[in-house]
Image: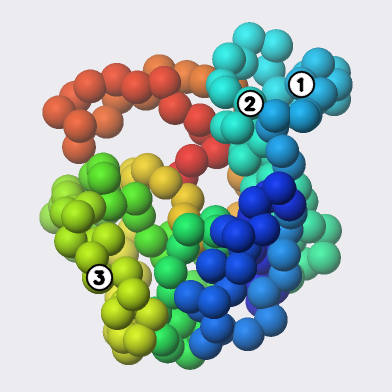
Amino acid sequence: MDKYLISLERTPERTERFLAANAHIPDFIHAPGIDGSVMDIDAMKDLGLIHADCHFTRGAMGSGLTHVALWGAAAKNGRGAHIFEDDAFLCRNFSEESEKLISRLDADWDIILWGNNSDTTLKFNLLPGITPCIATFSQSAVRKGIQSFSAMTVEALPFRLDHTFGICGYAISPKGARRLLEKCLPLRAELVQYDSLGGRSLFVRLLII
């Protein structure tokens, strides 16, 4: 599987930090990312990539279309891909553990999230159809443990995801990439209710899985 690092060309220090922190993982492909600050939004709307009524920030649009472009590459070349933002930290045995986990899944898997933003919630099925579980995190504790995490050996277990927030890192299959391209374009906002947030409704980017 290809391994992509998304990091803007105008922030080389973030690219260098990511590669240094994750030096134990080889062969990252640098995906420079679409810089929303200089993107021609009208052109993107004309191409059908952004909905006419989309009012995301320029940064959100650029980020979203960068992921869309990588999904397109995975769908076209028929290879799965790992995709990481430049603030992700990977455990010591990520390569071996991710390969082992994927090999145990059914062949029709779409997407696997390797992490979650630590300042929000995560809902998954501990036992499918029986035990929905909502998890919260301590962002301060996560930040304190970042440096040691890269040296840790982690044993992973797959759980079916209900919803989460953040795309720090994930794996996507060619089939999953095609499905996301169909469902997430043009970029737009919809009102979605999440019970992990106490039933509050949020406008969300549909490309956030």
- For the residues labelled 3 and 1, the Cα–Cα distance comes to 39 Å
Query: On the image, which quarter does residue 6 sit in?
Result: bottom right
Residue 21 makes an appearance in the image: yes
Residue 65 at x, y percent in the picture:
69, 39
Q: Which of pointers 2 and 3 lies earlier in the amino acid sequence?
A: 2
> Mark 1 sits on what residue?
41
Query: On the image, which quarter does residue 150 sit in?
Result: bottom left
Q: Report the label total.
A: 3
> In this rendering, is residue 166 above or below 51?
below
Could you tell whether 81 is left or right of 138 in the image? right
Q: Residues within 10 Å of mark 2 (few under 14, many from 20)?
A: some
- For the residues labelled 2 and 3, the Cα–Cα distance comes to 32 Å
Q: 13 or 81, which is in the foreground?
A: 13
> Mark 3 sits on what residue?
145
Residue 185 at x, y percent in the picture:
68, 31
- The residue under label 1 is which amino acid type? Ile
Q: Residues within 10 Å of mark 3 (few under 14, many from 20)?
A: few
Q: Which of pointers 2 and 1 lies earlier in the amino acid sequence?
A: 1
> Mark 2 sits on what residue?
58
- The residue under label 3 is which amino acid type? Gly
Q: Which of pointers 3 and 1 lies earlier in the amino acid sequence?
A: 1
> In this rendering, is residue 166 above or below 19?
above
Q: Are marks 2 and 3 in contact (CB under 8 Å)?
A: no
Image point (47%, 50%), residue name: 167
* Disc ID at residue 79: none
Image point (34%, 50%), residue name: 117
